[in-house]
Image (cartoon, rainbow, N blue to C red):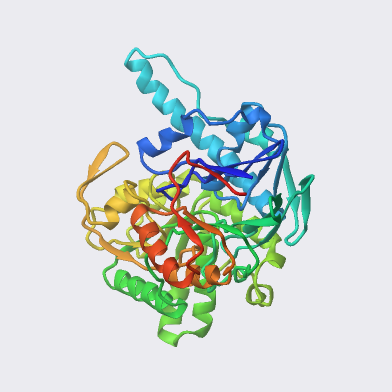
Amino acid sequence: MTITFIGATGRVTGSMYYLEHNNLKGLVDCGQFQGNFEEENLNYNTLPFNPAHLDFIILTHAHVDHSGRLPLLVKHGFNGKVFCTYPTMALTNVLLRDSGKIHEAENAFDNKKRERAGLPKVPPLYTEDDAVIALQYLYPLTYEHEMTIEGDLSFKFVDAGHLLGSASVILTFKGEEGLKKLVFSGDLGNGSNPVQNKPVTISDADYLIVESTYGDRNHVGVEQRMQAFADIIRTAVRENGTVIVPSFAVGRTQELIYQLNTFIDNTDEATRQLLEHIPFYVDSPLALEAFKVYGDNKDYMNEGVQSYDRNPFNMPNLHLVESIEMSIALNRDKSPKVIIAASGMCDAGRIKHHLKHYLWRQNTHVVFIGFQAEETLGRAIQEGESPVSILDETIAVKAKLHTITGFSGHADQRHLLAWTKAMQSLERLFIIHGEPAAMDVFAEKLSEQMPPETEIVIPGAGEVFHLL
């Protein structure tokens, strides 16, 4: 077995790992790079393999940084099976079509600038039609189903607890000393996710490839983060201001609404009155489609969601923004409200329009509830940069800024270490999907709990390793 690390090395996006075993070639994940212009340009790089020669692709989950280059691979000749779980298939259908639309829109904007500069037009990375074609190759499986790809190469999905349908992959192959197990963590949940089950513990493995997004820090508890969120809303109401929440449309937004519901059911009367009367707006077409998928797949969620006595992803004062006109109207409305909009790192989508209209107001509160990658607009605002450029305008940052950890769907350092500790027989452990500082801290912590014979590696882009 040979593995080449193509994406999510020294960064948190672009997950892609190329496998070669005997005469078989395949990928685990095929994600887009996301972030600044330089990072997104990596999506256009020539791949170190021919997509037409791939035999299979395994998707750990639907997020675009893990699935987003699938239409590109199909465009260039891939026609094999793309293994995923049933909910991942449903969410990938939503996310890839949306991604295709975004590429088309951004490409049309760029080509206008190129035309004015006398430059030839260029095609988009892929279109919505390309995404629709790619979706036909999805091949869904249930958790724990042992799937033989060919010969001695097989795998199964187990619940990773990160996102609806997210999975860790246990891949089995024949090595020189008999059967070996290679585990891909995928993105791991933090064990306290209010919607998802806890990640399945894996103890029997020879090689591990583990994410490290929060390898250098820990989250706060559910009660603490919801109370902090309520306190921010209370202050905004007192100031006659607006709360802006950049949120990933798929997963984070649905989990936030569910947490609000359960918090309202158990909090004091004054806080309940506050949260039941201030209007909440979800402004993301993608999030609206995801709400439907979540509603259809409650069997994949934890017992708390399944036993909820009403729709866990709705509230009487929740308004789903279904038109551009309604979205624009929110920026003219000066009354207190909470706007939850995508994208989560503020680099695309309707959140940019809301930030443009509200960021310069002193009675605005911006609440970051998810990871902000380096050189994204979200990271710039979070770190206090002012002014910032939004939609070709210079905007002063006068809003009050808040970061509440723990809403993230990613495991924190404590949970990553606990999940990894069960694998005491590892020969080699690879750390991926994190910023360099986080990976270094996580590697040091891992070295304290793993046996001395376990080799801990932080691979670089393009590095090739032979698993004997």
* 45 shown above or below 39: above
- What residue appears at the point 41 percent right and 14 percent down from the top-left corner? 120
> Residue 263, image x and y in percent?
49, 78
Tell which of 339 and 246 is nearer to you.
246
> Residue 5, image x and y in percent?
51, 43
> Residue 467, image x and y in percent?
60, 49
The extreme front residue here reads: 177
The extreme bottom residue here reads: 268
> Residue 241, image x and y in percent?
30, 64
- Left or right of residue 330, residue 194 in this image: right
* 258 shown above or below 58: below
Task: Choose top left, top right, bottom left or bottom right for residue 306.
Answer: bottom right
Regarding residue 128, the answer to whether it shows in the image is no
Tell which of 87 and 457 is nearer to you.
457
Task: Choose top left, top right, bottom left or bottom right for residue 56.
Answer: top right
Task: Choose top left, top right, bottom left or bottom right for residue 214.
Answer: bottom left
Regarding residue 50, the answer to whether it shows in the image is yes
Quarter of the N terminus within the rendering: top right
